[in-house]
Image: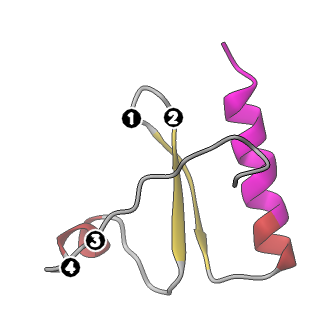
Amino acid sequence: MGELGVTPSVLMDEYGIIGKRYAVTALPCNFVVDKNGILKAKYFGYGEDVKKRFENQLMGLLSKP
């Protein structure tokens, strides 16, 4: 994330409210939310394929004005 110049927000869902609302079924779980607060993507688990898809989605959002 540092290479992309992004400082992510970290949500601590102490009571599981957000997990239920966004149907989190696995950890780790990462969400991509645009500057208007619109959920653009969510990624479950971790691996090179997930990392690449996440980075590509993020770069696409960051390149838009």
Residue 61 position within the rendered picture, expressed as x and y whole percent measured from the top left = 67, 32
Q: Is residue 47 magenta?
A: no
| Contact, mark 2 vs mark 1 (Cβ under 8 Å) | yes
Q: Name the residue under label 2.
A: 34
Q: Mark 4 points at which residue?
A: 16
| Contact, mark 1 vs mark 3 (Cβ under 8 Å) | no
SS of the residue under disc 1: loop
Q: What residue type is labelled 3?
A: Met
Q: Which amino acid does label 4 sit on?
A: Gly
Distance of label 1 from label 3 (alpha carbons): 18 Å
Crowding at mark 4 (Cα within 10 Å: few <14, some 14-19, many 20+): few
At a point 35% along the width and 65% down the height, the residue shown is 22
Q: Name the residue under label 1.
A: 37
SS of the residue under disc 3: loop
At a point 26% along the width and 65% down the height, the residue shown is 21
At a point 40% along the width and 61% down the height, the residue shown is 10
**33 over 44 or under it: above or below:** above
Distance of label 2 from label 4 (alpha carbons): 23 Å
Tell me the quadrant of the picture where the N terminus can be found. bottom right
**14 over 65 or under it: above or below:** below
Distance of label 3 from label 2 (alpha carbons): 20 Å
| Contact, mark 2 vs mark 4 (Cβ under 8 Å) | no
Nearer-N-terminus badge (4/1) = 4
What secondary structure predominates along the stretch shown in magenta? helix
Tell me if 15 is positioned left or right of 45 in this view.
Answer: left
